[in-house]
Amino acid sequence: MNSNETDAVVQAPDRVRLDVKEARLLATRAIQSIGYNVEDAGIIAEHVLDAALCGYEYSGLAKILNIEDNPRFRSPRSPVSAMRETSVSVLYDGGNNVGMLAMYRATQAAIAKAAQHGFAIVGMTNTWNSGRSAHYVEMIARAGLVAIHTVSSSHAVAPPGGAKATLGTNPIAFGFPRDPDPLIIDMGTSAFMGTDLNYRKRIGAQLPEGVAIDAAGRPTRDPGMALLGAILPFGGHKGFALSLAIEALGVLGGSGSDVEKKYGYLIIAIKPDLLVPLEEYKRDLHGVIERIKATPLLEGCAEIRIPSERMYRERERNLEEGIVIDARIHEALKSLAQRGSLR
C-alpha cells in the first residue's frame, strides 16, 4: 500500500486509527469484560495486536469478537493439562480454553523441551480459535529453533466435487531462525481463510470470486451464504491433499479426544545443531534467500518478495504510526470494554 492509499484509508469515515497503547488497552479491557483474568487477557491481547501490527486486520482486534461468538465459549473451562508426556513430547488437553491461550502454553513447552533435548513434538486438543499460526512459529524461531505447526480445525472446507464442509481451513506454518528476523511461512490450505470470511460478514463485505459455495453447492460471494455452505480448497486436488495430510497430523495432535473430534494442533520444534550448527544454518539460509532475491525480474516487477518480509515491514511501520481498524469493530470493542467496567 502506498502513502496515498494509506492516507485515504486513514481519512475514511468508517476507519479509526489507534496508537499501540490505545489498541492494547482497548483489547485487554474487551477481553477482560468477557471473563478472562489480567494475565490471560494480556496474552490474548498481545496475539491479536501483533496480528494487527503485521497488517492482518481480519485476524487482529476483530478476532476478540469471535471469541464470545463461538459456541464453545459458553462451555465450562478447565486448566490446560498433560494427557501424555515424555522428555521430548507432550499431548495436552486444552481444557476448552481459547486456542490463543492454549497454544501459547504449548509453544512455551515446545521451546523448553527442544532447547533441552534438541527436539520436541507437542500436541493440543480440546481448544479452539488459536489465531495466527505465524505467531507461534515466530516465537519458536526467535528461540533459535526450526518450527513446524499444523492445525486441524472446524469444518469449513468442502473437498473437490463435494457440496458440504468436511475439512478445516487447516493451516500449516514454518519458522526458521535467521538474522535479523526469522523466515516465517504461514498458509491455509483453503482458498480463503475462515477468519477473513467471518470478518467480511461482520463488516458487510463480499468474498472474491471462486472461493466459496452456498448450501446448495452454487458459487457465492456472500460470506453469510458461504458460512452455510463451504469454502473451497486452494489449488483444487493439491490443496485438498495437503489439507488431508494436516487433518491426519491433527489426529496425531489428539483431535480424536476433542469434544467435536475436529481440533488437533501439532507443533514440532527442532534444534538446528542436531544437524548443522545454528550460526552455519543461519548463514547458509541467508545465502539461499539472497540467491532467490537476486533472480532477474520480469518487466513490471519491482522485487522478489520473500514470505514474512511484508509482515516485518508492516509491523515496523505500524509500531510507529498505529493501526487502523473498521469503525464498526471499534464501536463493538468499546461496547465490550464498557460492559466490563459496569460490572
Image (tube, rainbow, N blue to C red):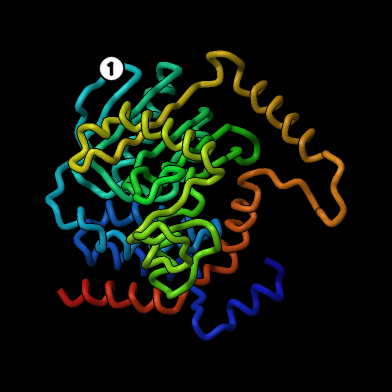
**Vertical position of residue 72 compared to residue 134: above or below:** below
Report whether 146 appears left or right of 125. Answer: right
The answer to whether 324 is drawn above or below residue 77 in the figure is below
The residue that appears at 14% across and 53% down in the rendered structure is 75
Where residue 107 sits: x, y (%)? 38, 36
Determine the residue positioned at 40% across, 46% down: 162
Left or right: 264 as drawn, with respect to 274: left
Q: Which residue is mark 1?
A: 86
Camera-side residue of 168 and 27: 168
Element marked by disc 1: loop
Q: Residue at x 50, y 56 (%)?
A: 211
Q: Is residue 189 left or right of residue 333?
A: right
Q: Observer-nearest residue: 30 or 166?
A: 166
Locate the C terminus by quadrant: bottom left
In the picture, residue 210 is in which quadrant? Answer: bottom right
Q: Is residue 14 above or below residue 318?
A: below
Residue 54 position within the rendered picture, expressed as x and y whole percent measured from the top left = 54, 56
